[in-house]
Image (spheres, grey):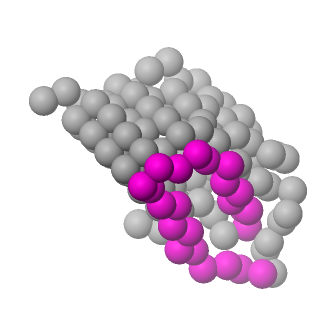
Amino acid sequence: MLSGTAGSNTEEYINTSTLFGAINRAILSKDFKGGKVKNLFGSTELDFTYADINGVVTLDISQAFGEVTLVVPSDWRVEEDLSHFCSVVDEDRCYNNRGYSSNKVLLLKGLSIFAVVDVVNFV
């Protein structure tokens, strides 16, 4: 069984690839810029609880028969521009309206085939 690899990551960018495996990663950057997630029969969990972004940040997701779970703070807005085929994006977050900041946007782009993207506040 092959597992996931973190690829060449810096504090600001992430690049993950998973084939029949799993990646669980906490993003700690206070100036996260985006990255790429690739899944084929894999699972990737990215926890942004202690991260921060400025403006619009793009996360490019390419997956087939996989699952991506994103733990996103309640003051970030999540927008999606994914191409779907038999897949779903499920945003199940509680919002804190007092701390909501419309200038923090995580934009999900890419392709999802027979797959799931879960956006949550906590795991």
Q: Nearer the viewer, residue 74 or 56?
A: 56
Going 43% across and 39% down the picture, which residue do you hit? 63
Q: Is residue 88 magenta?
A: yes
* Region in magenta: 75-97
Q: Nearer the viewer, residue 90 or 46?
A: 90
- Secondary structure mainly formed by the magenta segment: strand
Q: Quadrant of residue 6?
A: top left
Tell me: residue 90, above or below residue 26: below
Confirm whether residue 46 shows in the render: no
Confirm whether residue 48 shows in the render: yes
Quadrant where the C terminus sits is bottom left
Q: Nearer the viewer, residue 83 or 8?
A: 83
Q: Position of residue 59 (x, y in %)?
A: 62, 40
Tell me: residue 77, above or below residue 33: below
Going 48% across and 60% down the picture, which residue do you hit? 88
Q: Position of residue 71 (x, y in %)?
A: 52, 59
Residue lying at the far top of the rendered structure: 8
Q: Position of residue 37 (x, y in %)?
A: 49, 35
Going 63% across and 64% down the picture, which residue do you hit? 73
Residue lying at the far front of the rendered structure: 85
Q: Position of residue 104 (x, y in %)?
A: 79, 55
Quadrant where the N terminus sits is top left
Q: Is residue 62 magenta?
A: no
Left or right of 27? Residue 30 is right
Q: How many marks?
A: 0
Q: Quadrant of residue 32?
A: top right
Tell me: residue 13, above or below residue 48: above
